[in-house]
Image: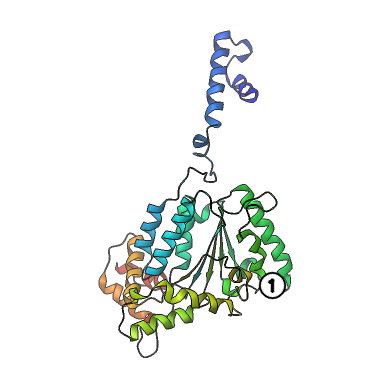
Amino acid sequence: MQLLLGLLWLLVPGSAALEPISLSIAIGAASVLTGYLSYPSFYCGFVECCPGEADRPNTTALKEDLDNKLFGQHLAKDVILKAVTGFRNNPNPKKPLALSLHGWGGTGKNFVSQFIAKSIHKAGQKSKFVHLFIATLHFPHDHQITLYKDQLQTWIRGNVSACARSVFIFDEMDKLHPGLIDAIKPFLDYYEQIDGVSYRRAIFIFLSNAGADLINKVALDFWRSGKDRKQIQLKDLEPVLSVAVFNNKNSGLWHSSLIDRNLIDYFVPFLPLEYKHLKMCIRAEIESGGKKINEAIVDEVAKEMTFFPKDEKIYSVKGCKLVLQKLLFYWERL
């Protein structure tokens, strides 16, 4: 209050000879300004704030993103929406939410992590409360694993202390040194507090290609038996997926205590994308670029992609990852 009065005193012309009525106005203005700045909604209109108890996730936006920007992933859509909504609406969660997303590149794992982050923090991955770790960038050297463990624990502890609803995303888990991720095990466990800090409202998301071959095999078996891929249920994949990842030395979760102690809430499989899903990705890219959809070009771009198995050519090898690069060649024709 004294600081505000001092500033007002300097800004008002002729302040040296301020009359009593002018002084009263200045004091009133300072009081009003102080009141506004101390009101959270006013302050947070200018500075990003950590969501409070009264703040709810934007589940409408999350559902719209999953429905309109994620293709061919009925399992992921259902699990993610229910998991995130249920977790954020729980007033007293017993542990942080831990999601492990698995599948080939280009199937939508990174998209989904962005959607989740945006549903919790308006700025999404640009938020200071959302933290992205890329294995090959942040943890490149195996011989420094002890240092990385210390740094990782310090980073998570400090950021959850600043915002209980922090979101941590670990990309390229299949390239992470086995054992490194176990450094965060205490933060994912059922502890009420650790050194005075509660981690129960944080979200941890792991992205990995590990287990993709298993997911692809299940999808292909369904296709070869004449079944619709939408008949694939989570129970067909999740149990075998967790075991496969646990026993895979290249998963980043090899013999991890996170799996052994059942600290990962959901193993979310991302199915390989068929030709029709690839065309959906192409149309979405065209529309996002403000262009009118040309079905002839959509077909041309889709046919340039590589498919597997060699004989049937059912699934896109790179998912939708190369769609934009391929589409740019045709951009002037749109």
Task: Between residue 242 and residue 269, name the one nearer to us.
Answer: 242
- Furthest residue to the top? 20
State the residue in front, 142 or 231.
231
Locate residue 280: give its quadrant.
Answer: bottom left
In the displayed structure, would residue 29 be above or below residue 313?
Answer: above
| Residue type highlighted by circle 1 | His
Label 1: how many Cα within 10 Å (few below 14, some 14–19, many 20+):
few
What is the image's colouring? rainbow
Q: Residue at x 37, y 57 (%)?
A: 63
Tell me if 226 is positioned left or right of 38 in this view: left
**Numbered disc total:** 1
Q: Nearer the viewer, residue 89 or 127?
A: 89
Element carrying mark 1 = loop
107 versus 165 height, above or below: below
Residue 147 in the image, given as x and y percentages of width and height: 73, 65
Tell me which residue sits at (64%, 64%) in the image: 185
Residue 135 in the image: state x and y as whole percent: 61, 69
Quadrant where the C terminus is found in the figure: bottom left
**Which residue is situated farthest in the left direction here?**
295
Image quarter in which the N terminus is found: top right
> Residue most toward the bottom?
311
Query: Residue at position x 54%, y 27% from top?
Result: 35
Is residue 289 visible in the rendered structure shown here?
Answer: no
Residue 299 image position (x, y, % from top left): 29, 76
In this rendering, position of residue 318 left or right of residue 32? left
Q: Which residue is mark 1?
A: 141
Q: Residue at x 55, y 12 (%)?
A: 22
